[in-house]
């Protein structure tokens, strides 16, 4: 996974958590889901902090979007894999394959990816376990007019503040 994919994944998790925590029915079930979302958001921050402490100083907090790609090695690199292993226990549920949270995030991201393809980026990939992997690196130009147009057209389906970073 490239740097943009890591940012998309981190951002997607944060928006999914934020969206799950918002809602105002006031019943006990709604309050419980809000508390669950806050706990998961805290876990996401702890996971990001762990990744930074284990050799990836540029790893972003969930929802952090400076408009630039984070300074990270490739996801397949030894450095990234080492940090990932060290921090696996802190990974938020929406990023863990097979969890209900991951299935919901996957469903939302799939709708967004389909919209991006329909709106001019036909080779945009489907998400895999809450992450969008753009391979080969650089195969989608996040700065192209067609990509920016597609992102704007799909804004209502956007998951996690995916702002159209390519890579």
Image (cartoon, rainbow, N blue to C red):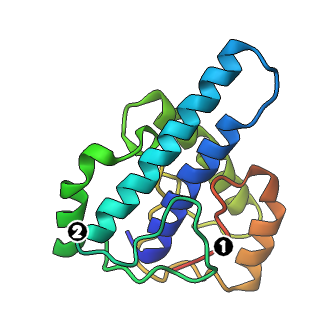
| Residue in the picture at 70% in, 61% down | 116
Residue 96's place in the image compared with 48, above or below, is above
x, y percent for residue 165: 60, 76
Q: Quadrant of residue 64?
A: bottom right
| Residue 56, numbered circle | none
x, y percent for residue 26: 79, 20
| Residue in the picture at 81% in, 67% down | 152
| Residue in the picture at 42% in, 38% down | 93
x, y percent for residue 159: 65, 52
Circle 1 SS class: loop
Residue 99's place in the image compared with 165, above or below, is above
- Mark 2 or 1: in front is 2
| Residue in the picture at 60% in, 43% down | 17
User: Which of disc 1 and disc 2 is earlier in sequence?
Assistant: 2
In the rendered image, the quadrant that contains the N terminus is bottom left
| Residue 164, numbered circle | 1
Q: Quadrant of residue 86?
A: bottom left
Give the class, few, some or many, for how many residues have Cα within 10 Å of label 2's Cα (few <14, many ≥20): some
Along the line of sight, the residue nearer the viewer: 12 or 110 = 12
Residue contact at pointers 2 and 1, CB within 8 angstroms: no
Along the line of sight, the residue nearer the viewer: 68 or 167 = 68
Outermost residue toward the top?
A: 28
Q: In the picture provided, is 59 more to the left or to the right than 105?
A: left
Q: In the picture provided, is 155 more to the left or to the right than 130?
A: right
Q: In the picture provided, is 127 more to the left or to the right than 72?
A: right
Q: Quadrant of residue 105?
A: top right
Residue at mark 2: 54
Distance, label 2 to label 1, CA atoms, is 28 Å
Along the line of sight, the residue nearer the viewer: 68 or 75 = 68
């Amino acid at each position: 996974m490239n740097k943009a994919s890591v940012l998309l994944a981190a951002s997607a998790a944060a928006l999914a958590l934020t969206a799950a925590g918002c809602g105002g029915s006031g019943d006990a079930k709604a309050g419980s889901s809000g508390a669950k979302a806050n706990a998961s958001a805290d876990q996401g921050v702890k996971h990001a902090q762990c990744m930074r402490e284990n050799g990836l100083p540029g790893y972003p907090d969930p929802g952090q979007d400076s408009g630039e790609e984070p300074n990270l090695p490739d996801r397949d690199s030894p450095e990234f894999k080492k940090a990932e292993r060290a921090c696996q226990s802190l990974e938020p549920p929406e990023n863990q394959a097979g969890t209900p949270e991951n299935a919901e995030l996957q469903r939302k991201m799939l709708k967004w990816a389909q919209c991006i393809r329909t709106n001019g980026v036909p080779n945009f990939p489907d998400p895999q376990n809450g992450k969008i992997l753009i391979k080969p690196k650089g195969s989608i130009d996040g700065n192209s007019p067609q990509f920016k147009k597609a992102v704007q057209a799909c804004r209502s389906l956007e998951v996690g503040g995916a702002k159209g970073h390519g890579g």
